[in-house]
Image (spheres, helix red, strand yellow):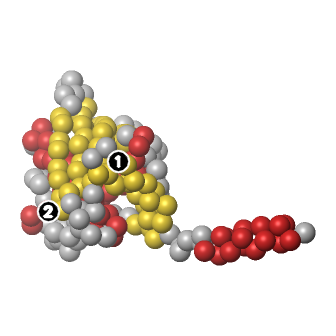
Amino acid sequence: MKPYIALSWALLGAACVGHSPDASFYTFVPDSNCATHDGGECVTQDTRPITVDVARVRVAEYIDRTQMVTTNGVNVYVSQDNRWAEGLAPMTQRQIISDLTTRLPSASVKDANFAGPGGDYSVFVEIYQLDGALGGLARLRASYAIASDGVTPRPRTVNFTSHAGDTYGDYAMAVGRMVDKMAAQIAADIAATAK
């Protein structure tokens, strides 16, 4: 009996010691330069009235999860205690929609799955890399294409870096800033063709 009692106490002790704190959840915040905008620098360029569908945002599998992923060389760290509030792909898509709405005030911007006719422009985004190291740099490498009637979409590759900060909250802000930069570039490309 004594070995079983000792094993029971050992398992109970391990369960108590192994209890992890509640997870922290993060999301993107609006572009701080545009949060209280009244036009100004947040407007890329006013266009004729157009509709823009953010049709698809795909994310590399190693980061397509709610857990936050950081890297150091070839090592990949998946944090169980620090998580995105939802899947990275839908959260990124919603942030791009928000940014385009701010930067293209004459445009109607929506998720392509929303009911209604197709847009004048469709945006497709593929994120290949979105990671970094706390205390170092965060990186975003992606391609996007903008499709419209009669125009063959040409993918454009973007690379951004941002200081990751020392905490996961800082890291979430850095990722949001890079998504905002990508959205600003998409808005500029749409505005250049929608004059």
Query: Would you identify the image quadrant in which residue 41 lies?
Result: bottom left
Tell me if mark 2 has few (under 14), some (14-19) or many (20+) residues whose alpha carbon lies within 10 angstroms of its own: many
The residue sitting at 49% across, 61% down in the picture is: 80
Tell me if mark 1 has few (under 14), some (14-19) or many (20+) residues whose alpha carbon lies within 10 angstroms of its own: few
**Taking 159 as reference, is 110 left or right?**
right
Type of amino acid at the residue the image marks with label 1: Asn
Q: Is residue 133 above or below residue 155?
A: below
Q: Secondary structure at mark 1?
A: strand
Q: Is residue 10 visible?
A: yes
Outermost residue toward the front in this view: 2
| Residue holding disc 2 | 42
Type of amino acid at the residue the image marks with label 2: Cys
| Residue holding disc 1 | 75
Residue 128 screen position, x and y as percent = 30, 39
Q: Nearer the viewer, residue 120 or 85?
A: 85
**Taking 47 as reference, is 65 left or right?**
right
Q: Is residue 102 visible?
A: no
Residue 101 screen position, x and y as percent = 26, 56
Q: Nearer the viewer, residue 122 or 10?
A: 10
Mark 1 vs mark 2, CA separation in Å:
38 Å
Q: Quadrant of the N terminus?
A: bottom right
The residue sitting at 23% across, 43% down in the picture is: 141
Residue 194 screen position, x and y as percent = 14, 41
